[in-house]
């Protein structure tokens, strides 16, 4: 029985001119375009605290009632609105409103931050919208251990990744870990 040197021959073949046509010539981006959405007023405080610690590729928004606005981290442009019943609002309430589609346009990750089970309806709206467009979602349920169960249950169906924590600073850690 004759043994073939599979590794050596496959490596040699991979470096051939014939195989070179299959190589990707463009550089791979190492950062994500991320949208961070506070789903309730206390979560807005957490999101606002992180606003200036991250790159301009992170857009921070706050969900408030039926009107939605959003702003980029550097304060340029204001976004808002979704045809559904929940929307996103920036720290700048005077900014013009645009659809949620504009607020998360180009994002490949949406992080939802909540402190209350009441955020479930907003999480559902955003979660369904992201699922239809194959945008990855993450949830951060912040609050004391005994109260976080309801918040986590509200986010769980709509967040592919879910972190339950008492530390509001974990938002910064998540964004750093996800290269936002």
Image (spheres, rainbow, N blue to C red):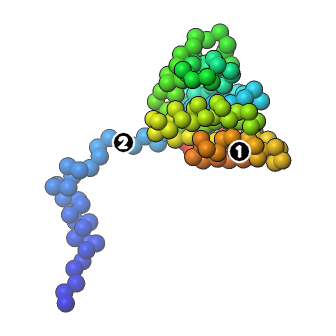
Residue 152 numbered tag: 1
Nearer to us: label 2 or label 1: 1
Residue named by callout 2:
27
Quarter of the view holding residue 96: top right
Quarter of the view holding residue 140: top right
Q: Residue furthest bottom?
A: 1
Q: Nearer the viewer, residue 124 or 141?
A: 124
Residue 15 numbered tag: none
- In percent of the image, x 59 and y 41: which residue is there? 158
Q: Nearer the viewer, residue 17 or 123?
A: 123
Q: Nearer the viewer, residue 36 or 99?
A: 99
Quarter of the view holding residue 176: top right
Rendered view: 33 above or below 6: above
Rendered view: 70 above or below 36: above
* Residue 174 x %, y %: 64, 44
Q: Nearer the viewer, residue 142 or 126?
A: 126
- In percent of the image, x 66 and y 25: which residue is there? 63
- In percent of the image, x 63 and y 17: which residue is there? 67
* Residue 66 x %, y %: 64, 19
Number of other residues with Cα within 10 Å of mark 2, as a class: few under 14, some 14 to 19, many 20 or more: few
* Residue 155 x %, y %: 66, 41
Q: Secondary structure at mark 1?
A: helix
């Amino acid at each position: 029985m004759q043994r073939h040197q599979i590794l050596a021959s496959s490596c040699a073949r991979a470096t051939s001119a014939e195989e070179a046509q299959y190589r990707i010539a463009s550089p791979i981006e190492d950062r994500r375009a991320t949208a961070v959405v506070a789903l309730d007023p206390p979560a807005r405080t957490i999101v606002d605290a992180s606003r200036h610690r991250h790159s301009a590729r992170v857009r921070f928004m706050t969900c408030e009632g039926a009107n939605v606005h959003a702003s980029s981290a550097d304060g340029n442009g204001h976004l808002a609105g979704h045809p559904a019943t929940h929307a996103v609002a920036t720290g700048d309430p005077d900014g013009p409103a645009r659809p949620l589609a504009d607020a998360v346009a180009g994002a490949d990750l949406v992080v939802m931050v909540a402190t209350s089970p009441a955020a479930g309806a907003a999480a559902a709206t955003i979660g369904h919208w992201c699922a239809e467009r194959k945008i990855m979602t993450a949830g951060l349920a912040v609050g004391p251990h005994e109260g976080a169960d309801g918040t986590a249950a509200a986010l769980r169906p709509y967040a592919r990744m879910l972190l339950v924590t008492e530390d509001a600073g974990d938002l910064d850690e998540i964004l750093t870990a996800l290269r936002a």
